[in-house]
Image (tube, coloured by chain):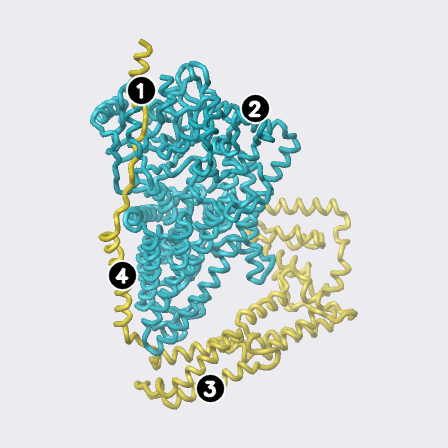
Amino acid sequence: MSNIMKKVSWSSREDDPGVAERTPLLNGTSRQFSSSDIFRIGRLSTVDLEDDKDGSSSELNQTEEIPHNEKLLSVRYESLDYDNSENQLFLEEERRMSLLGFRFLEFKRWLVCAFIGIFTGLVACFIDIVVEKLSDLKYHAVKQSIVKFTEAGGLCISLILWATLNAAFVLVGSLMVAFIEPVAAGSGIPQIKCYLNGVKIPRVVRLKTLLVKVFGVICSVAGGLAVGKEGPMIHSGAVIAAGISQGRTTSLKKDFKIFEYFRRDTEKRDFVSAGAAAGVSAAFGAPVGGVLFSLEEGASFWNQMLTWRIFFASMISTFTLNFFLSIYHGKPGDLSNPGLINFGRFEDEVKEYNLYEIPIFMCMGVIGGIIGALFNSLNYWLTIFRIRYVHRPFLQVAEAVLVASVTATVAFAMIYFSEDCKSLGEEPVEHPLQMFCKDGEYNSMATAFFNTPEKSVRSLFHDPPGLYKPQTLGLFTLSYFLLACWTYGLTVSAGVFIPSLLIGAAWGRLFGICLATSSNSMFADPGRYALIGAAAQLGGIVRMTLSLTVIIVEATGNVTFGLPIMLVLITAKIVGDYFVEGLYDIHIKLQSVPFLHWEPPPTSHALTAREVMSSPVICFKQVEKVGKIVDILSNTSTNHNGFPVVCDQEPKRLCGLILRSQLIVLLKHKVFVERVNSSLIQRKLQLKDFRDAYPRFPPIQSIHVSQDERQCMMDLREFMNPTPYTVPQETSLPRVFKLFRALGLRHLVVVDDENKVMGLVTRKDLARYHLGKHGLEELHLAQT
Amino acid sequence: MVGRMIARRAHVIKCASRKQEVNWHQCCPELPVSEHGTAQISCLNKSKMRFTDFIILAVYIGLSKALQPDGLGLPVAEWRQRVSLSELSLSATGFSDSFPLSIDDSHCQALSENLTQKCNAFVNCTLRYAQPVGVCLNCYKEFYDYKSLYRIISLPDKGSTDNCSQILLKSDRLQVFVVFNDFFHKLWEESECENCVSDTVIKNDTLYFLNVLQITKSCFDTYQQPGNYCDVCKQCKENYSHLNEVYNKMGKNSSLCIDIEDMMNMTRKMWSKTFNCSFSRLEAVPVIAVSSFMLFLPIIFYLSSFLHSEQKKRKLILPKRAASSSNLMNIQEKKS
């Protein structure tokens, strides 16, 4: 068995079917899964039976193509190395460091968090101001035209002007996203969720992504799409955190030579969670909500100091935003704009609720859950269609532009045909449109449509009762629901928080009005129901619980409303989960990300590490020939990242684990035994060399190894992780899963009684199993 | 003033506790008359008192008197100065006819009476012009008079010895003058009168607007025929839109006050409701056409991309795993 291990790989190679055939697999029989169908793993015997059947009948060199669906795992995604590689170099460096050194390091962490907060706040401030300016300009121009053509006739010119302006903004935004950085599309929350889960999404935390994200979101909000700027703020915060903590930008090729200690996945991921929290905090003015968001969505390791640092970053971020907005509004020091979305100050009668209203609120939670589930399933089908058919960049741009102009058209038609007029002056309205109302009155449909979504939310919360007619609200809810559902998933960077709030606020207000008319104004204030409806709708769509409750409580600035909001969110989540998953989870699945949930799938106890692991495994010897390393690394079909290192003498016991990135650095610096002996290298390789290469290690193809050098030997002992985590073969899947999830592992070696390598468990091996309609199902690996 | 409060409270308590038949007002002279005392008595403020509370109170007062032997000692001199005791009547009916109390300082007395008059004038005026709103343009003089007098009282010249501000404005808990002053200022601020009138004169912008409004109104009057308003709409359109322009311009300069807003509102209502001169939805067809064309585009887009775009396929990668059974067999074989 031992000689097998050296020769075979532990994963498939679709380009090289012959290898699999040549390879003597375990027990001498060649076995291969046909993965043409998803098979059930009810219990062990079922698996065995089907395995045998499939194994005998399958074609070995068959590669199959199927349309994209949710039951795939992409090989594109790698894990983060959250677990530190404790090799000799690392230990030496740590031992050299004094107590003062560690103190200084801790101080630097705080410093980084402060910077994260400040820059996140500044970016939020920039977005807010630019969006406000641009949309003011746009609405002003359109209003001028409408006023002109209402009198003179030819209002369709205004319609075309509005649609063109929208389309132009969105064109710019979606061009940037589609052609410069596609990963900046959408709200970015799914991507950040994945990153915090431990999946390395390519290019997700780069400076270029940040720029595209920021300008993209400005374009899409100013372009009048049914989107918000809050979700992208979380992504922006995360990118800022990743950038600052590394003290350099590889996009601009600028290295400030600071914070070099933080250049590894462990530290970076911690800072990214702080950045995400700072983003939430700047978006909603909810520092505690931000911390809880990071807790709920991310960080597996959660210690007290990290929490405290994250909270610090959040506070700094909301303060920075507040401070600079106060300067912008001409009232320096008046700290009343803690977040991008400002729910405004609620009057006392809105805040006070009665005990008998709680069941009503929960009914609204049920409605929110159902509408949210409908939203998610519609968006699911739309997204599948988009992945399958609208995948070329120019088609995506065209789609976005189309949506933008249709949004303007729908809004215009709604305003045009609305009969609902209110007299001017009761409440300040930003862009009052008269249209066909009497003089001194304005169209109340226009307050909802002819405005940025945030302002519409605010007016739905606060406008006095009787401002909107029920039919206006009903029509608005319906049309905005469809528009928002259609918009999410376009190739523009935009969030779904605000549209959800707006839909919810509209039907909540409608609900409140209906209650008031049916019950003699016992439920007087529709603003309260608008708030509850918004919470229910948001909960029904995104299905966050703890963090969302706190975010809404903080954004409304009112703790007494905490209980109803929590109950509503719980109800909405329970009802929604009955039908379909949350929107972010759907999108994570559709992107084929190997995402590990909190818990292993139930009914997976029957599986053991032996069934889960990939096997056989490519291993290296402690002193390995350079030629072999280069060959294995450059084999494109076996794009492995971790290699167990085995002892030289029999039996070949496991004695370490080495990563591809480390091998590449070693090859680049030509750390060969022969050269060290002949003292050709001036200095010893240090941890700094690994850090400098992080996070973009060069591909193996860029490293030239001459024919002579191929004969050299490489001593891996100093660089490998001598104490990798291992499990015996009989370990159950849930146990392996928990180890993985809690420690943030990337590779877990499966060994037998003699400590010989039997297999390797990676993230994808675990993420394959999920609970489907027919019990435990297995996902396919696919190239995307 | 403290004595007055005691009188009133004693009255209240007496009414509330008639059943207990306690001749409460007899205790009053024993009450410690001080800041301290006010605080003690304020607990009596609750209109309903039970007998037990009474006893507790009595004990408490006795106690505090015991602790403070010269109970009446503290600010009696001041008290005497400000309130002429002869008028402090604690008769069984509570209040005597001789209210209000007179103030010793005759200068302050005069000021107080004067201020009352000004208040009256202003209140009268605002109420008279409450609907249709004409508060700013009709009452600005009254407000100015009142305001200047109040300023004289509240901010006496430096060096002057009179402390009417202290006596009239700050000596009791209620501070009626201050409350009214706040109320007047709030009224004035909310009506944004400052935009139309500056202290004693009506601003030029406002006069110009009134002028334009007058012209428009006279136009309305000229062409108005009951039942047939076509003429009005045609003839006065120019005037009316000029008025609108002026109004909008004033809105931008923030020189609008409630009077002008209200006048404009009335005029607009007359124009669009009574005369029915506003626009109607004449040309819905082009809008419908353009909208439906726009709504039709996505359908074409999705259909064409469905039909012509190549469906994205994913290459499956075969996982290489040790099958459970084989491994199991392997181990079993080895063991055997």
The quarter in which the C terminus of chain B is drawn is top left
In this rendering, the label closer to the viewer, 4 or 3 = 4
In the image, residue A587 sits, relative to residue B198, either above or below, namely: above
Q: Which residue is mark 4?
A: B297
Q: Disc 2 residue type?
A: Asn
**Mark 2 or mark 1, which has the lower sequence index?**
1
**Mark 4 or mark 3, which has the lower sequence index?**
3
Q: Which residue is mark 1?
A: A26
Q: CA distance from mark 2 to mark 1?
A: 40 Å
Res. A677 mark: 2
Residue A220 as seen in the image, left or right of residue A116: left
Instruction: From the rendered image, report the letter of the chain displayed in cyan.
Output: A
Q: Are there few (<14), some (14-19), or many (20+) residues within 10 Å of tag 4?
A: some
Count how many numbered circles sit on residues in the image. 4
Query: Could you say whether the residue bearing mark 2 is in a helix, strand or loop?
Result: helix
In-front residue for pair B252/A663: A663
Query: Could you say whether the residue bearing mark 3 is in a helix, strand or loop?
Result: helix
Residue A77 as seen in the image, left or right of residue B147: left
Tell me the subunit letter for badge 2: A
Q: Disc 4 residue type?
A: Leu
Q: Which residue is mark 3?
A: B214
The quarter in which the N terminus of chain B is drawn is bottom right
Query: Could you say whether the residue bearing mark 1 is in a helix, strand or loop?
Result: helix
In-front residue for pair B84/A26: A26
Question: What residue do we see at 46% from left, 84% from top?
Answer: B213
Q: CA distance from mark 2 to mark 4?
A: 72 Å
Q: Disc 1 residue type?
A: Leu
Chain B palette colour: yellow
**In contact (CB < 8 Å): disc 3 and disc 1:** no
Tell me the subunit letter for badge 1: A
Residue lying farthest to the front in this orientation: A708
Residue A533 x, y percent position in the rendering: 38, 51
